[in-house]
Image (tube, rainbow, N blue to C red):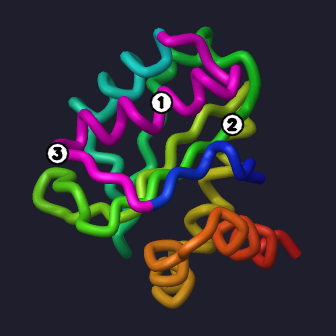
Amino acid sequence: MIKKENIKLNQSAATKEEAVKAAGQILVDAGAVEPAYIDSMLERESVVSTFMGNGLAIPHGTEGGKSSVKESGLSLIQIPEGVDFDGNEAKVVLGIAGKGNEHLELLQRIAIIFSEEENAEKVINASSAEEIIEIFESEED
């Protein structure tokens, strides 16, 4: 579901825009999206906050940004001191790009994982990418 190289631990971001750009850049570097997808992520964020609760924000592109998606991908940035998402504190910023409607399944699985505060805390406090991957994979069964 998520690749080790797409997980960045102990990061910091001064603004939600900076956090969204960083999450998008990981997707660009992974070859999942074209750079224009980042603008699409920022555009969505300017219309509606992607903060979901339990310290999680899931920035993703607009419908118009879909043409910039080459393949489905996830990026995860752990921000221990948090970053302000319109009055809410996000400690995990999970960038999503879905080919076709694959993002809907990804969003659903992420929502299930983070609906449990215990899982959210595990991701927020994880000290390795492997720990985070384990949490995601344990929910796939």
- The amino acid type found where label 1 is placed reads Gly
- The amino acid type found where label 3 is placed reads Ala
Question: Nearest the camera: 19 or 105?
Answer: 19
Queried whether the magenta region covers residue 27, the answer comes back as yes
Q: Residue furthest bottom?
A: 118
Assess disc 2: are there few (<14), some (14-19) or many (≥20) residues with their C-alpha within 10 Å of its C-alpha.
Answer: many
Query: Closer to the camera: disc 2 or disc 3?
Result: 3
Rendered location of residue 14, percent (x, y): 16, 45
Query: Closer to the camera: disc 3 or disc 1?
Result: 3
Q: Which residue is mark 3?
A: 14
Can I make out residue 118 in this image? yes
Q: Which residues are magenta?
A: 10-35
- The amino acid type found where label 2 is placed reads Gly
Rendered location of residue 30, percent (x, y): 68, 28
Q: Which residue is mark 2?
A: 73
Q: Which residue is mark 1?
A: 24
Rendered location of residue 22, percent (x, y): 40, 35
Assess disc 3: are there few (<14), some (14-19) or many (≥20) residues with their C-alpha within 10 Å of its C-alpha.
Answer: few
Give the number of marks.
Answer: 3
Question: Nearest the camera: 96 or 82?
Answer: 82
Q: CA distance from mark 2 to mark 1?
A: 10 Å
Q: Is residue 10 above or below residue 116?
A: above
Q: CA distance from mark 3 to mark 1?
A: 16 Å
